[in-house]
Amino acid sequence: MNMEAIKAEFQSELNVVEDAKQLSSFWTKFLGKEGQIQGLMSGIKNVPKEEKKAYGQAVNEVKTWAQSLYDAKKEEIDKKAMMARYEEETVDVTLPAKHTAAGNLHPLTSIRNEIINIFAGMGFEVFEGPEIEDDDHNFTRLNVLKDHPSRDMQDTFWLTEDLLLRTHTSPGQIRVMDAKNPPIKVLVPGKVFRSDSDATHSPMFSQMEGLVVDEHITLCDLQGMLDQFVKAMFSGNVKTRLRPSYFPFTEPSVEVDVSCFKCGGCGCSLCKGTGWIEVLGGGIVNNKVLENCGVDSTKYSGLAFGIGMERIAMLKYGINHMGKLFENDIEFLKQFKA
Ligand code: PHE
């Protein structure tokens, strides 16, 4: 085929190329290694010697011409494809955003964080002990002797003759005193286990133990700290009162009541008409417990308290059934979004 015919065909076929696929076969037909223009190049061997130069030049011109037309077409097609994509991927910025629900902390986690924050402000550190304890840490060294009723089969989940699921966070006291010397000021948060279940009891619940051991620690320090705690936790207007109680590991032992933050102390359903709500137990660390941990009880004294975290959460948020805190009912939990 002669040059003019190829040019004419090139031109007319290029005119009808519409997309990248057609352009690619067009390229193969004319500009590819085995294409017609390359064919013209190879045709030089049949041209008489004296015409070779002119022929070569002419083919080169065709090649440059073809390439530039091809490039222009390619640019046009690329641009068309890009515009089509822009069209297709258009984002309507006026559409309302998709709602992604952010999670929130479980109320017990919030309470735990809040208690830690309050006591951290008074210089307490956090220590965590194991949930599986032995008799020694959970009972004996806390002065809970062999025949004490709290060891009863009904309360304690025994795993072996010696191992059990801790029934309180108080074994943390022993572990901390074993690990460090006074002055001590720690919180021990954690899960505890007792064979007990009703509206206000669950076989698993959480406590926050507090322990302070130093020189001259008295019941006044305990009440002062707990006063600060309930004011920060419930309301600036509440007061605490201590009532005598009994725990084998504290002497004297107290129950701590807070004046009702709902009715201000006049009596309502929350405080069952008494004006006071029981919030925790505590006392002065029994000398026997200090001695069991090698702490010199003639030099040091200690205070300890145990806060039931579910109880605090129930009081603070007005929850009437402890089970609600463990059911993972998403509708219930959503209400605690901070
Ligand atoms: N361990 C006690 C309980 O579980 C609470 C407590 C802790 C009492 C520390 C006194 C001192 O009931």
Image: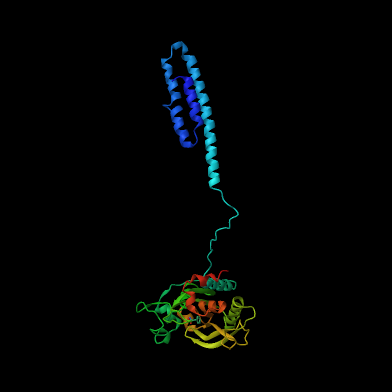
Q: Is residue 212 visible?
A: no
Q: Is residue 78 visible?
A: yes
Q: Residue at x 43, y 22 (%)?
A: 39
Q: Residue at x 64, y 80 (%)?
A: 237
Residue 144, image x, y percentages = 43, 84
Q: Is residue 244 left or right of residue 141?
A: right
Q: Quadrant of the C terminus?
A: bottom right
- The quadrant of the picture occupied by the N terminus is top left
Colour style of the rendered protein structure: rainbow
Of 138 and 314, nearer the camera is 314
Q: How many marks?
A: 0
For this view, does 312 lie left or right of residue 141?
right
**Residue name at image x 51 percent, y 86 percent:** 251
Is the residue 36 above or below the residue 52 in the image? below
Which residue is at the far right? Answer: 237
x and y percentages locating residue 336 in the rendered image: 55, 71
Return the residue nearer the eye: 275 or 294.
275
Q: Which of the 4 image quadrants contains residue 142?
A: bottom left
Residue extending farthest to the left is 161
Residues 178 and 317: in front is 317
Q: Position of residue 195 (x, y in %)?
A: 41, 81
Picture coordinates of residue 325 (x, y %)?
49, 75
Residue at the outermost top position = 50
Residue 173 vs residue 233, the one in the foreground: 233
In the rendered image, the vertical position of residue 67 relative to residue 273, given as above or below: above
